[in-house]
Image: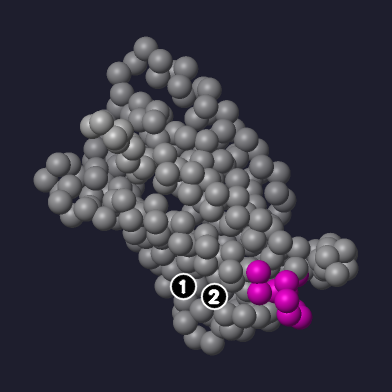
């Protein structure tokens, strides 16, 4: 059964699934530009920028960070609402939802927001650039760089081949998590007077973990039912969710576990 799923998925991917509606969208002609940017991002944040900052004081960027983070709040909120209004709020099935390949206003709206989600993943690479330039090296973890480095390239395929349907569920959920995350970052950048408003910091990681659990459950449905959605993308989304669930659980344990007290203490 798995072999047949993969064979049909590859066939769908090669022949049917490429969506002509995105041909004229920025960066959608070829995956090479996305791949090059992602590779340069990894090189820049792990080698070029740390070397540049080695003997320099950290930048502050306070006003820039406030603007950037709240701009990302607006963008993430817009993407969340557009995914909802073009499908998930208005009739999309949470079990099996094929891609609408028509040129109806609703279908094109979903194509547009899928592309915006793809573009937002490139903008989010600035998160790491700011961390490095501010010498917040403890935040430039393997989890952070891997997550940011793989999302833009992987979502090129989502926007190019399946801009809508079942696979956009995780993007819809992710945009809401990022809406909350950038509110936290924005309030943090505003200084100590606003720290009382981000008492929920610890729960951000819990929400991210919950996001990946929900995506794992959601994507696993298609292993047990017939659905007119390319199964190869379902395998990719499910595998991605499992990998990041493990990484975020490990991060949570390392960041929030309490030291065990000895009996004599």
Q: Quadrant of the C terminus?
A: top left
Position of residue 85 in the picture relative to residue 163 (left or right): left
**Label 2 to label 1, Cα distance in Å?**
8 Å
Compared to residue 102, the image places residue 157 above or below, namely above
Image coordinates for residue 202, horizontal then vertical, percent? 31, 51
Residue 192, located in which quarter of the rendered image?
Answer: top left
Q: Give the range drawn in magenta.
A: 220-230
Residue 234, located in which quarter of the rendered image?
Answer: bottom right
- Secondary structure at badge 1 equals helix
Depth check, front residue: 6 or 134: 6
Residue furthest to the top in view is 55
Residue 251, located in which quarter of the rendered image?
Answer: top left
Q: Is residue 222 inside the magenta stretch?
A: yes
Q: Is residue 251 inside the magenta stretch?
A: no
Residue shown at 31%/24% (left/top)? 58
Can residue 3 be seen?
Answer: yes
- Contact check, label 2 and label 1, Cβ < 8 Å: yes
Residue 109: image tag: 2
Residue furthest to the bottom in view is 91
Residue shown at 60%/39% (left/top)? 37
Compared to residue 121, the image places residue 136 above or below, namely above
Report which residue position mark 1 lands on.
82
Which is more N-terminal, label 1 or label 2?
1
Image coordinates for residue 106, horizontal then vertical, percent? 56, 82
**Camera-nearest label, 2 or 1:** 1
Image coordinates for residue 130, horizontal then vertical, percent? 38, 35
Image coordinates for residue 51, horizontal then vertical, percent? 47, 17
- Mark 2 is surrounded, within 10 Å at the Cα level, by few (under 14), some (14 to 19) or many (20 or more) other residues, namely some
Can residue 75 be seen?
Answer: no
Position of residue 72 in the picture relative to residue 101 (left or right): left
């Amino acid at each position: 059964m798995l072999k047949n799923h993969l064979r049909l998925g590859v066939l769908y991917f090669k022949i049917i699934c490429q969506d002509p509606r995105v041909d004229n969208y920025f960066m959608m002609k070829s995956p090479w530009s996305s791949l090059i940017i992602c590779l340069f991002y990894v090189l820049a944040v792990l080698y070029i920028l740390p070397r540049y900052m080695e003997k320099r004081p950290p930048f502050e960027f306070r006003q820039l960070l406030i603007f950037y983070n709240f701009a990302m709040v607006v963008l993430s909120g817009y993407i969340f609402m557009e995914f909802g209004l073009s499908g998930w709020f208005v009739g999309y099935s949470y079990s099996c939802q094929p891609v609408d390949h028509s040129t109806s206003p609703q279908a094109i709206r979903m194509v547009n927001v899928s592309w915006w989600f793809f573009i937002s993943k490139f903008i989010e690479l600035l998160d790491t650039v700011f961390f490095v330039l501010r010498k917040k090296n403890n935040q430039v973890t393997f989890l952070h760089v891997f997550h940011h480095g793989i999302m833009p390239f992987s979502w090129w395929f989502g926007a190019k081949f399946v801009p809508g349907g079942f696979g956009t569920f995780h993007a819809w959920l992710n945009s809401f998590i990022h809406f909350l995350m950038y509110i936290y970052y924005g309030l943090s950048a505003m200084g100590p007077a606003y720290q009382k408003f981000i008492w929920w910091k610890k729960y951000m990681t819990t929400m991210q973990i919950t996001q990946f659990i929900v995506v794992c459950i959601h994507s696993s449905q298609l292993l047990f039912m017939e659905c007119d959605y390319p199964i190869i993308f379902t395998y990719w989304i499910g595998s991605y969710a499992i990998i990041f669930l493990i990484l975020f659980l490990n991060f949570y344990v390392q960041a929030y576990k309490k030291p065990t007290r000895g009996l004599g203490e």
